[in-house]
Amino acid sequence: MSKPVEPNKPLVTHIYTADPSAHVFEGKIYIYPSHDIDHDGPSNDNGDQYAMEDYHVLSLDDFDSPCVDHGRVLHVRDVPWASKQMWAPDAAYKNGTYYLYFPARDHDGIFRIGVATGSSPAGPFKPQPHYIPGSFSIDPAVLVDEDGRAYMYFGGLWGGQLEKWQTGTFNPDAKGPAPHEPALGPRFAELTDDMLAFKAPPREISIVDEDGRPILAGDEERRYFEGPWVHKYNGYYYLSYSTGTTHSIVYAMSKKPEGPFVFKGKILTPVIGWTTHHSIVEFRGKWYLFYHDASLSGGVDHLRCVKYTELHYNDDGTIRTIDPYG
Ligand code: FUB
């Protein structure tokens, strides 16, 4: 019988996993990670080293139980529009169906976001034949709000191609804003009632400082890079994300799902490896951060492992910074 997973230890060690999106479904914690694989290909700012081909689903009955791997739930060869690089996924539940949202490159090498459906949170999932019309870039995160409306947040710089969509169409030569210009924000779109399409074209989310000034592209300690996650606590929407080049998970708050979000601070200090990616979930009255690092492979950044730790709020609703090795 395997042992319960300890905080700040890999959830599983028989496969490499990353980008954990955790949800409570049917009274258990389900984790939807990327499935990292080893390969001989190049490593570069384009993200070619993240060559994932499929998804597994993990679950925990509770934090005293071992982590269960439910096996492969979707492979890139089963997705007609996708060619490679099954990056950070997320999942959602509505009206009796589970939805797995995932980015991948299409047959032109452009990242798009697809959706697959299933009747169990553990999969398997059947992909839609086409990517979500109007979708682009990476790292979908879906919030089903208390009123039943569902929102997708997405987007990532560099390999995630967000810079290339500033005009609304794909420009392979486009560069990001200059350091003194507002940083690019994640994108936001409400989902249709069937959860398979956007109600309207995605809009950019604005992240501002306490004085309402946009966070600038040169402010790499605070500007958006990739990996958005939105959760609700005490009536506020918390948008958390990776700062990429400075390797932190930070957050901003808003009273509205579409923002603007006011920058607040740091949730997670840098982990072993280049990337950092997380999710936040409430389970039985406590809050947890799921995250990854590259400790299982001795620091090889495309061979990562997902972990969890408890997350604490201060009385004013701000989040206490976590040092996973502290
Ligand atoms: O896992 C591939 C990419 O690395 C993800 O999409 C990013 O968020 C980063 O973790």
Image (spheres, rainbow, N blue to C red):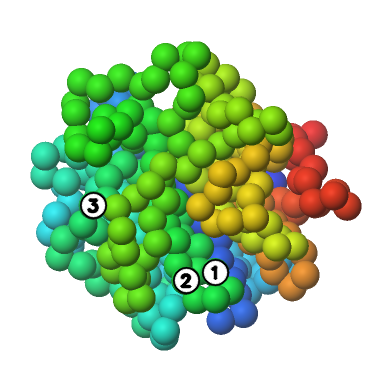
- 27 to the left or right of 244: right
User: The residue tagged with tag 3: helix, strand or loop?
Assistant: loop
What residue is disc 1 on? 145
Q: Which residue appears at 56% of the width and 37% of the height?
A: 207
Q: Are marks 2 and 3 in contact (CB under 8 Å)?
A: no
Which residue: 11% across, 44% down?
A: 107
* Residue under label 2: 149
- Taking the view exactly as shown, the residue that stands out farthest to the front is 212
Looking at the rendered image, the quarter that the N terminus falls into is: bottom right
111 on left or right of 123:
left
Does label 3 or label 1 sit earlier along the sequence?
Answer: 3
Pick the residue in front: 214 or 134: 214
Q: Position of residue 235 (x, y in %)?
A: 70, 63
Compared with 271, 204 (above or below) is below
Q: Is residue 323 above or below residue 196?
A: above
Between 196 and 203, the one nearer to me in the picture: 203
Circles 2, 1 touching at the beta carbon (< 8 Å) = yes
The local secondary structure at tag 2 comes to loop
The earlier-in-sequence mark between 2 and 3 is 3
Tell me residue 60's x, y (percent).
60, 68
Disc 1 packing (10 Å; few <14; some 14–19; many ≥20): few
Q: Residue 227 location in percent, x, y?
A: 48, 42
- Distance from Cα at disc 2 to Cα at disc 3: 19 Å
Please give the residue where the numbered disc 3 appears in the rendered image: 134
Residue under the image location 20 percent in, 67 percent down: 128
User: What is the three-letter code of the residue carrying label 1?
Assistant: Asp
The residue carrying pointer 3 sits among few (fewer than 14), some (14 to 19) or many (20 or more) residues within 10 Å by Cα, namely some
Measure the alpha-carbon separation of dots 3 and 1: 22 Å
